[in-house]
Image (spheres, rainbow, N blue to C red):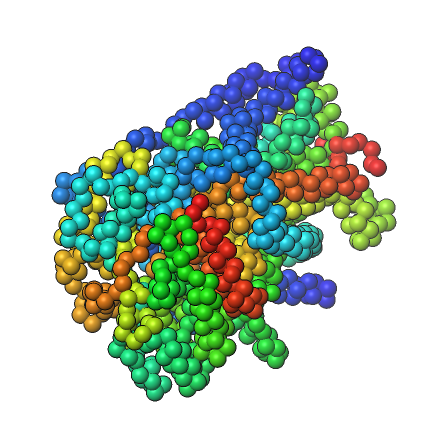
Amino acid sequence: MIARLRQSVPAYLFLLPWLIGLLGLTIGPMLLSLYYSFTDYALLNTPEWTGLHNYTTLFQDSRYLQSLKVTFIYVGVSVPLEMAFALAVAVLLNRGLKGLAVYRALYYVPSLLGGSVAIALLWQQIFGSDGLLNDVLGVFGIHGRGWISEPGTALWTLIVLRVWQFGAPMVIFLAGLRQIPDEVLEAAEVDGAGRWQRFWRVTLPLLSPVVFFNLVLQIIGAFQAFTPAFVISGGKGGPSDSTLFYTLYLYQQAFGNFRMGYAAAMAWVLLLIIAVFTGLNFVLGRTWVFYGDEGARR
Amino acid sequence: MNTFSRRTLLGLGAATAAAITLPGCSGKSGPMRVSWYGPDPVTKALNKALEAWKSSGGAEYAAESAPFDDYWDKLATQTSGNNAPDVLRMSMSYFSDYAGRSALKDLGSLGIDTTGLDKDVASSGVADGKNYGIGQSSISYAMYVDEAAVKRAGGTVPAQGWTWDAFAEFARDYSGSVQGSYGSTDQAGNFQLFEVYARQHGTELFSDDGGKLATSKDTVQEWFQYWAGLRDAKAAPPQNISAETTAIEKSLVAKGKAPLQFGWVQQVTFYQPLVKGPLSVLPVPQGKAGDLSGQFVKGLDLWCVSAASKHPEDAAKLIGFLLNDEKAIKAIGILLGVPPSKKARDLVSADAGSAGARAITYVEGLEGKVGPSPQPWPKGYGELLTGFGRIAENIGFGKTTPAAGAQEFVDLAGKTLGQ
Amino acid sequence: MKRLLAHTGLAAGALVMLYPLLWMISASLRPNTEIFEHPGLIPERPTLGNYALGWSSTGTSFGIYLMNSLIICAAVVIGNVLTCSLTAYAFARLRFVGRKTLFGLMLATIMLPGHVTLIAQYSIFRNLNWIDTFWPMIVPSFLATDAFFVFLMVQFIRSIPVELDDAARIDGCGAWGIYRRIILPLLSPALVTTAIFSFIWTWNNFFSQLIYLSTRTRLTVPVALRGFLDATGSSEWGALFAMSVVTLVPVVVVFVIFQRRILAGMAHTGLK
């Protein structure tokens, strides 16, 4: 044990900044928020212990359940779509097309707008009752509705927003593709592998750690999505709570209703949900992710 | 061989340590901090007023401001982290949340001169016998009507506004005669306008101690049914159109699709630039013609001092200055609302014929005609405000009925108030 | 023929991606009252008034906000690139007691929504006297608190064959040597990606900047942009769009420059 601890010293030295950050800035507040989740804490005065009350109230709160539903739909639909676009476009752009750099920049631009307040307006202008989409549909004789202002469709405009901003995972895929040695692909070509075979049996496996990363983090990110709904619905999660993302409801309770304890309980439930999905990802990942540091190929 | 260059290691450690122990460039026990919410013109005006304060020998200050929505997140964080500003602008929506949790200082003993202020406004921040804030504007709810548009459609506008029944008829007639327009905006989710309606139907919105909803479920239901009726008759827009027209520049009145808009009196100055004809400022619909007792005049924005302030006397002096000093009053103008004292209103004398002047005339005209000012909105008001709007939205989209919605609201109030 | 198809496809896609941005530029050239009128892209009476108004409207030149954001973002880029790579190297390549637990803990730190840890962190920074300074935004990046980039780099490092490490070890390199000579250079695409995202996400990160910064001259771009909209008054749409366009410029520039560097040197990896 002592010997192993001694061997660990170089690693701990590399980890020193992270450890300081963890102990000084992160762990304390995290544990404190766990404590809050068992209290009634109105932000402006001191927390009062209430035990499991927050947690039991959660599952009887119809708006909470609604936020769960909205968030699960959002994650389930937007993450696969976004990843598919990101991978497809990254592969296309990695081919050495002329004007490559320009296209890459153009496809990334939407991600640059981030959670800008201007997005709310842009989305209104496109998906509102008198917006661009309805103008285009009108050309084909289709009468559009208020996509962004009706509860049945508002969430879909947010899904479109996330997929539109696929530039971030795309850039990561591109970086990963860049890391694949040309020699390996050339060798495969020499061996007679066709384009699709090369992609499927050489590129993808070598890219799998990056695919895994994107998948895990996009799921975590989508569960925690806040700014799109906050900006587009003006913080309300409307129309009729159809865009009430989990973290938006959390924020409403914490800062709008002075119920930080309740919000903390929500936060820890979310952490559990995300941890379960991430754990699942890691377990499943053992079957399809291929790392260069594992020596022989499977 | 050495597994590690000791020097690099030390360097790394030292750099990290230095990085986190270096303090920021400014100490924090600094001058008095003044904080407010509002758009840019408000910020500019208050900065000017503060300069007047400085040049007349007032204490040092540091100013901070943020737009309305962001301001509350920041204030809550600051107060919770024991870093609240000294002088702060407070909205009646959150006043009880702060006052009721001892975050505001009792101004009673600080000797701020409120003698010139309108009576209801000076006492706007009185709760539990203590004075936690002083109103900085006198406002009341109003309707702004584009009379020229009404005339073109062949209608007339009564001098004191309509009764609710007459208003419904007017809205239906208007939308019937003007293609593609609505006679009214949909106010079903407007909790603040509902307060006037509730008062017209017998009780205040809230019980005196703020612990219960005093209005009956039936009144709430009638209110939702009234607006549902207007929507069905196409006299008011469908729910999704209302959702898309909340911004002032996109509002129906600005686009000429409705001849009127509801709002707090001072907001007329924001709508006027977008409408060609002059907007008259009229009382909101009444129960009995000419009976304005449902409305009230109050200061809904207040100046407060935080309980933990280290500069209470300077803070009090500053508030007194902002309310009473000529230069400050002139700098602020009507940007915080209709000025809260006769003296200020005379000083400000907005250009005759302008929307601002009409707002002032309207408020002055209400004196003696409106009902008593209600108590400060209780703790949890914010949640009821958004909940009311949400339930109205659900009704508008057909997800629930006025009866069920009214019950839901009453239940929500029961859960939220009196905590 | 295939190339033509590919080009048209990509170009059409680019237009769809860009349309909202084009609309924003067009709106920035229109007076406030006309922005919501015509859905077309070409403004009828283009004017630069919004740019002038937005630049100076709050009494402080918008250039100051740009400068503040640039300072913070540059510092965060440096901090993240340095410390996240150190941390990732340890997790990916070194053996130590508690590795799996600490890795799980690191991932857990990004699973908790930030709104609930905000208050406690605010108190910590208050005790350090760092409120209304840039430190709360910068220091965490020097402490590798952004697990996203640590995990990103871990994945990239794990794609680097261990044989390279072994070769270096035979040549006499220790952990630090391997880090500096083998891993860091080969990690370059991930480092550049980290730099790009650190910059862009910090540039757009308004919530913590809103909470921690108060003095007008210390505000940053996203906070200032939100200042153009206010629920209690009329909003300055034109100025908002104009300044949004202006603030996109540094971000695009950073992106373009860094993207080139990803391409430039690192196409060839492999055993040397």
Which of the image's four quarters has the N terminus of chain C? Answer: bottom right
Q: Is residue B321 visible?
A: no
Q: Nearer the viewer, residue C257 or B413?
A: B413
Q: Position of residue A21 (x, y in %)?
A: 53, 29
* Residue drawn where x is 59% and y is 41% of the image: A55
Q: Nearer the viewer, residue A138 or B136?
A: B136
Which of the image's four quarters has the C terminus of chain C? Answer: top right
Q: Nearer the viewer, residue B118 or A101?
A: B118
Residue A188 sits in quarter:
top right
Q: Position of residue A72 (x, y in %)?
A: 65, 52
Left or right: where B372 falls relative to C151: left
* Residue drawn where x is 32% and y is 76% of the image: B162
* Residue drawn where x is 81% and y is 43% of the image: A187
Left or right: where A145 falls relative to A208: left
In the displayed structure, A295 sits above or below B394; it is above
Q: Is residue B262 visible?
A: yes
Q: Position of residue A193 (x, y in %)?
A: 84, 50
In the displayed structure, B306 sits above or below C231; it is above
* Residue drawn where x is 57% and y is 43% of the image: A266
Q: Position of residue C168 (x, y in %)?
A: 70, 24
